[in-house]
Image (cartoon, coloured by chain):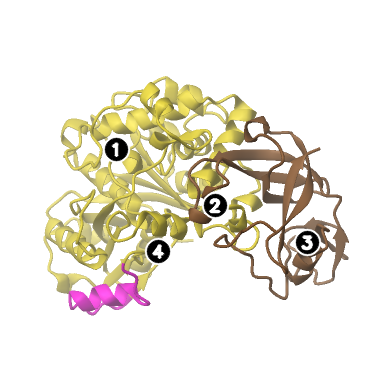
Chain colours: A yellow, B brown
Amino acid sequence: MTSLSGKVAIVGAADTEVGILPGVGATQLCVDAACRALSDAGISKDQVDGLVTCNSMAEPYMYHAEAIAEYIQIFPRYCISASAGGGTTFSILHHAASAILTGMCHTVLISMADTLRSGLSREQAMLMQSATGHGQFERPYGPTVPAYYALIAQAHMAQYGTTQEQFAQIAVACRKHAALNPAAQMREPITVEDVINSRLIADPLHLLDCSLVSDGGSAVILTSAERAVDFPHSPVYLLGVGEGHGHEHISQAQSLTTSAAVESGQRAYAMAGLEPKDMDLAQLYDCFTPTVLLELEDLGFCDKGEGGAFVESGAIELGGALPVNTHGGLLSHCHPGNPGSMFALTETVAQLRGVAGERQVDGAAVAMVHAQGGIMSSHTSVILGRETA
Amino acid sequence: MANHSGKIFPTPTRETAHYWEGCREHKLRLQCCVSCGKHQFYPRSVCSHCLGDQLRWIEASGAGKVISFTLVRRAVSEAYKADTPYVVALVQLDEGPTMMSNVERCTPESVEIGMRVTAFFEEWSEEISIPKFCPI
């Protein structure tokens, strides 16, 4: 079997302005991100022969990738929009890398944007997202997205003695990192007490345990390792990729406290020939604080049930053993919906290029990035590195 | 019948009609596979364990236990606002399958993991009754 490891690299990466951007359409943001990434890669649009996007909730198209290609008048030979909720970014990365390896195309532009904050009303955004629930067997009971994750948090607390304060510690770490990131939407430092004293949304989750609702876009350019050396920036190589898929609806989950991140992580580590202890940093999907705690355990950074103690030790903060979400994450940098993890990806590229400024992890050479879509449903783990092996 | 307008009403399909008809008669029905003998919820056209297509309907006892729960304080929409804080729970039925539901007829703060509960039915319309749970 052909392995992707070391054969594909990211050669361009850029974000748009993020946060609250009234009047800016999601299509415009997607194109803005694309242009910035092309410029970062130092190539013209005509050198792109693959385009992958995800649909926008605020400005949807039946054929989203085609709409973006049309907007900037490119005529790719590989063109598709994909959706795996929050897991879309890394799922797309996996598919795009495979497309390059099989010769479907040579240079892929991945561009994603949405305007959940300004393009939808609060009520619309909540209803659209909670629609992930089963129409007959979940949604009539009035669950919200925070409620689905609260079910996971509550089960973890009961099974392992995890505390609200430990969940809160994750929000505090992300905010601490965002404070060092001029682009982040929320930069005012917070404390564990601030999180606990913020309004309860769905017990045990408080307002500050929940990610932001934002506008924003982000894009990367992917090409083969052979071509990658001809670009202006040092390539960032894909060393390992793995997926794991457990369920769609949380009421059908095999386990509330262990997710298919176990499988996605193991597959990515096996492909890369690396272990959790080899990672210099990690960007983990943080739609809600408990998500990060489960991922730390399931991806092998600590034992099952030890996530609470791990975050309490300060390990996930810059300067700790495994800095997590160095840009501030969905909790403090920005969260425009399905494109959310694109910013974790572009941040990782910056870290591995060594240009992350005040939040640079010293000597960062290898990173784990992980995202999940649905309610701990669809997982993709990617290991990125400065060198091919 | 209390006013439930604006709430998210289930739309029964051929696969699920018998379940919802049961609810209307205040019976909680599950499917049981003739081939492998396992129960499943939600209703499907085939057995999710062995893909057997011979499924018989049984009436569940309605008893189960809370395996997780949350108190929803920010309602999903205006129609659910009057119910806040409401308990969204995962209930594992004694027959094995797990379903999402609301736990009611108790103070929300008294709900805990492991709590034994039993089904009751809330009538939302002439056609639709929703199975919910209360402490035993």
Is residue A74 shown to the viewer in this render? no
Nearer to the camera, B51 or B7: B7
Instruction: Name the residue beneath numbered marker 1.
Output: A328
Q: CA distance from mark 2 to mark 4?
A: 40 Å
Q: Amino acid at mark 4?
A: His
Image location (x, y in percent) of residue A88: 40, 58
Image location (x, y in percent) of residue A222: 27, 60
Q: Amino acid at mark 1?
A: Gly
Q: CA distance from mark 4 to mark 3?
A: 44 Å
- Nearer the observer: mark 1 or 4; the answer is 1
Label for residue B80? Answer: 2
Image location (x, y in percent) of residue B3: 62, 58
Q: Residues within 10 Å of mark 4 (few under 14, many from 20)?
A: few
Instruction: Name the residue beneath numbered marker 3.
Output: B23
Q: CA distance from mark 1 to mark 4?
A: 27 Å
Mark 1 chain: A
Whether residue B46 appears in magenta in the rendering, the answer is no
Dot 3 or dot 2: first in sequence order is 3
Q: Residue at x 30, y 54 (%)?
A: A117
Mark 4 chain: A
Whether residues under marks 3 and 2 lie with C-beta atoms below 8 angstroms apart, the answer is no
Q: CA distance from mark 3 to mark 2?
A: 21 Å
